[in-house]
Image (spheres, rainbow, N blue to C red):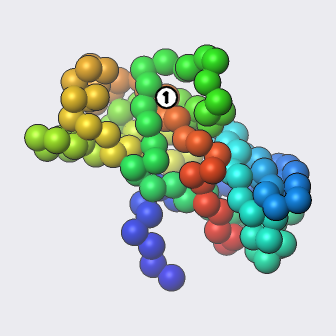
């Protein structure tokens, strides 16, 4: 299957907590950073996701926010540090490619945000992703 989702981060499941309808799945990415995905309990069962499973974390670029430093007092727990590799900016929107340990991410943000944050190639950033916006694929 081919997907339009370009953010596909390889990792290994380190923990699965299954609730009544939803589950949280902790994934150690290839570069060592950890993220958490919130998926349905049915998906965990159907995909056979257990601790040690190899997975890909899938995230649409429109679901990745950027900050110039870690953010405290925020419900978004997935904060992945990286460095801006490239910015393709139009009049309204920009695609910001970020190198993270073990791969890369693309964030679709407004051109105004790029300017307000002072982003350029080499800038340190933190990619913020809600756990409910991460899908998992088994490999």
The residue closer to the viewer here, 5 or 74, is 74
Task: Work out whether 59 lies above or below 94.
Answer: below
Task: Work out whether 138 lies above or below 88.
Answer: below
Where does the C terminus fall, quadrant-wise? bottom right
Determine the image quadrant of residue 85.
top left
Which residue is labeled 1 in the image? 126
Residue 65 locus on image (x, y percent): 44, 36
The residue closer to the viewer here, 106 or 52, is 106
On the question of residue 71 being in view, the answer is: yes
Residue 24 locus on image (x, y percent): 78, 51
Which SS class for mark 1? strand
Callout 1 environment at 10 Å: few (<14), some (14 to 19), or many (20+)?
many
Residue 126 locus on image (x, y percent): 49, 28
Q: Residue at x 64, y 68 (%)?
A: 137
Counting labels gives 1
Task: Work out whether 41 lies above or below 72.
Answer: below
Residue 9 locus on image (x, y percent): 56, 54
Q: Residue at x 55, y 59 (%)?
A: 58
Determine the image quadrant of residue 50.
bottom right
The residue closer to the viewer here, 20 or 45, is 20
On the question of residue 86 being in view, the answer is: no
Q: Residue at x 84, y 72 (%)?
A: 45
């Amino acid at each position: 299957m081919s997907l339009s989702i370009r953010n596909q981060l390889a990792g290994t499941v380190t923990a699965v907590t299954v609730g009544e309808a939803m589950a949280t799945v902790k994934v150690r990415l290839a570069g060592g950073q950890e993220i958490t995905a919130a998926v349905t309990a049915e998906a965990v069962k159907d995909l056979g996701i257990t601790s040690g499973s190899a997975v890909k974390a899938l995230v649409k670029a429109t679901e990745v926010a950027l900050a110039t430093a870690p953010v405290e007092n925020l419900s978004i727990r997935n904060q992945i540090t990286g460095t801006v590799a490239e910015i393709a900016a139009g009049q309204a929107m920009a695609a910001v490619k970020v190198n993270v340990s073990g791969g890369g991410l693309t964030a679709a943000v407004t051109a105004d945000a790029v300017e307000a944050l002072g982003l350029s190639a080499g800038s340190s950033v933190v990619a913020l992703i809600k756990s409910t916006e991460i899908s998992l694929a088994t490999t």
